[in-house]
């Protein structure tokens, strides 16, 4: 099985966005339960999910907590979407390999399959 990077681009603005992030978390959980290499990357508006899911009162906090050890979030986008401080206070690593963003090129070069939500 090739390694997989799940990239969450959906923001927190609509019910369909919640569906996308829940599907992403479930996918990461499935790969994790099979001991397959997987990364979860919050990018763009998706960085807003780090503080939202980090809230213990969020309906999907437990699911997020089960997979957050695989998570990274775009450093640049966290700033653009006003969640830099929340990212720093979380256990989610900051990703900034390419001009402040996660390097999708590096992931592909390393053999990762990229799946976006």
Image: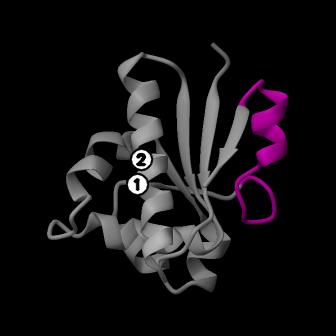
Question: What residue sits 54% from the left and 31% below the top?
Answer: 38
**Closest to the observer, 97 or 36:** 36
- Give the image location of residue 65, x and y in percent: 26, 49
48 to 102, vertically: above or below: below
Q: Are marks 2 and 1 in contact (CB under 8 Å)?
A: yes
Display colour scheme: one colour
- Residue placed furthest toward the front: 16
Quarter of the image containing the C terminus? Answer: bottom right
Magenta highlight range: 97-112
Across and down, in percent, residue 24 comes to 49, 48
Q: Nearer the viewer, residue 100 or 35?
A: 35
- The residue under label 2 is 25
What is the crowding at mark 1: few (fewer than 14 residues within 10 Å), some, or many (at least 20)? some
Q: Which residue is label 1 attached to?
A: 22
Residue 9, image quadrant? bottom right
Q: From the top left corner, tell me how far across and down residue 96 is, in percent.
A: 68, 58
The local secondary structure at tag 1 comes to helix
Q: Main secondary structure of the magenta part?
A: loop
Q: Residue at x 73, y 65 (%)?
A: 100
**Relative side of 5 to 22, left or right:** right
Name the foreground residue: 99 vs 105. Answer: 105
| C-alpha separation, residue under disc 2 versus residue under disc 1 | 5 Å
- In the image, is residue 101 part of the stretch drawn in magenta? yes
């Amino acid at each position: 099985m090739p390694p997989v990077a799940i990239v969450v681009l959906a923001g927190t603005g609509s019910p369909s966005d919640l569906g996308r992030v829940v599907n992403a978390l479930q996918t990461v959980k499935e790969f994790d339960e099979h001991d397959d290499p997987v990364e979860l990357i919050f990018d763009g508006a998706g960085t807003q999910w780090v503080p939202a899911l980090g809230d213990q009162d969020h309906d999907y906090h437990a699911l997020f907590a089960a997979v957050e050890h695989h998570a990274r979030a775009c450093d640049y986008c966290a700033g653009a979407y006003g969640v830099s401080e929340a990212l720093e206070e979380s256990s989610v690593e900051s990703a900034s390999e390419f001009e402040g963003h996660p390097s999708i090129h590096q992931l592909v070069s390393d053999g990762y399959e990229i799946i976006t939500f």
